[in-house]
Amino acid sequence: MSMSSPHKIAVRTPTENYDIHVGQEVLRYFARGPATLLPGRKAFLVSHPTLLDLYGPTVTDALRQAGFTTEAYTIPEGETSKTLQTAAALYTHLAKCGADRRSVLCAFGGGVIGDLTGFVAATYMRGIPFVQMPTTLLAMVDSSIGGKTGVNHEFGKNMIGSFYPPRAVCTDITLLRSLPEREYLCGLSEIVKAGVIDDTELFALMEREVEAIRQRDETVLTTLIERAIAVKVRVVEEDPTEQGVRAILNFGHTIGHALEAVTAYEQYSHGEAVAIGMALVARLSEALGLCAPAARNRLYSVLEGLGLPVSYADIDTQRLIDVMAHDKKAIDGVVQFVLMRDIGTVVYRQQVPTDALESLLVEYA
Ligand SMILES: NC(=O)c1ccc[n+]([C@@H]2O[C@H](COP(=O)([O-])OP(=O)(O)OC[C@H]3O[C@@H](n4cnc5c(N)ncnc54)[C@H](O)[C@@H]3O)[C@@H](O)[C@H]2O)c1
Ligand SMILES: [Zn+2]
């Protein structure tokens, strides 16, 4: 198979300045590309045991070719690893191995690895270089971009953290071949979101290529991923610290987060919850006269075509509303929504009357 060289997408904000390298076999290009920007030649690879079983030699070879010595450190899979305790153990490991300000942390994994490693990179010796090597679709189009790093606290998800940009992001889409289906769908949900909030062409591509996407056709996936990254980069560049427009990235997430919380993060994956959230918020937008039924229908068709859910069952509506009122993005208990005007256009900071929300949830859940 011939390998085209990776595409570069630049991220430029007052505090962030790095490139996202996207394509097939991006890791092989590491020595010639991203590595040239890094100081020192000591790399610490942070990953999960299963990912190192699958790709350990590939990543280590890429780093070695660029002249790095590598030390691999693994953490157990799952959201429960994203804690201060795990971070503390990693600090200890780094200190014992003599990591210094010229050492590089490489986050090889999904959002859990990326957020945790980024947080450790931001805080160890007041900040050392790090590189994102996303391995899940969600991490490729979402969590590896925008500089948010952090860990969970018993009182809230992502409660402890900081904005800290990586030196580079290496997005190798061939890694998706081994990604479990449920994780793949999770990322697709965020790509649908990217289309709805800011890219009609991306959305139309998903409509046309539903089958190829389900088959993980890498030509289609490359375009899809690049466009979704571009959406997030545009939004982040416009609003790096989440003062305004960055809120649109939350489309479908207010209801989605509430669904996850009410079901104790067990029933729905994040992507499934967001898919349901997007579907319901489209209904809400329609009910409020903001969006035409045809646009809402297009969203439903794409979600269902990809195999994502559009409704929930057996959840108490009032509990859902209570959780939303306590959402960290609610202002004085009033829930803020990102509503849809059309495919490609949304409006944010919309306060929705509780009765409108309630009747929607009762009718369509
Ligand atoms: N920083 C941000 O802006 C941001 C944005 C969105 C989400 N997040 C965070 O991201 C996290 C979720 O990330 P996620 O959805 O990537 O989940 P994840 O990191 O838990 O990864 C999911 C699972 O897939 C496995 N896996 C990963 N890549 C694989 C591959 N190529 N082949 C086979 N298996 C693979 C992993 O071992 C893991 O068990 C959450 O903690 C969330 O808070 C952060
Ligand atoms: Zn999300």
Image (spheres, grey):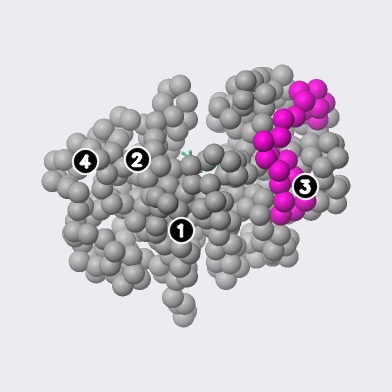
> CA gap, disc 4 to disc 3?
46 Å
The disc at residue 341 is: 3
Is label 1 in a helix, a strand or a loop? strand
Instruction: Name which residue type carries label 4.
Output: Met
Instruction: Name which residue type carries label 1.
Output: Val
- Residue that carries the numbered disc 4 in the rendered image: 125
Is label 3 in a helix, a strand or a loop? strand
Q: Which residues are magenta?
A: 338-360
Q: Quadrant of residue 220?
A: bottom right
For marks 2 and 4, the one nearer the N-term is: 2
* 7, 46: nearer the viewer: 7
Mark 3 or 2: the one toward you = 3
For marks 3 and 2, the one nearer the N-term is: 2
Classed neighbour count for the residue bearing mark 3: other residues with Cα under 10 Å, few (<14), some (14–19), many (≥20): many
Mark 1 or 2: the one toward you = 1
Classed neighbour count for the residue bearing mark 1: other residues with Cα under 10 Å, few (<14), some (14–19), many (≥20): many
For marks 1 and 2, the one nearer the N-term is: 1
- Residue at 48 percent across and 42 percent down: it is 241
- Residue at 58 percent across and 30 percent down: it is 329
- Residue that carries the numbered disc 1 in the rendered image: 11
For marks 4 and 3, the one nearer the N-term is: 4
Instruction: Name which residue type carries label 2.
Output: Phe
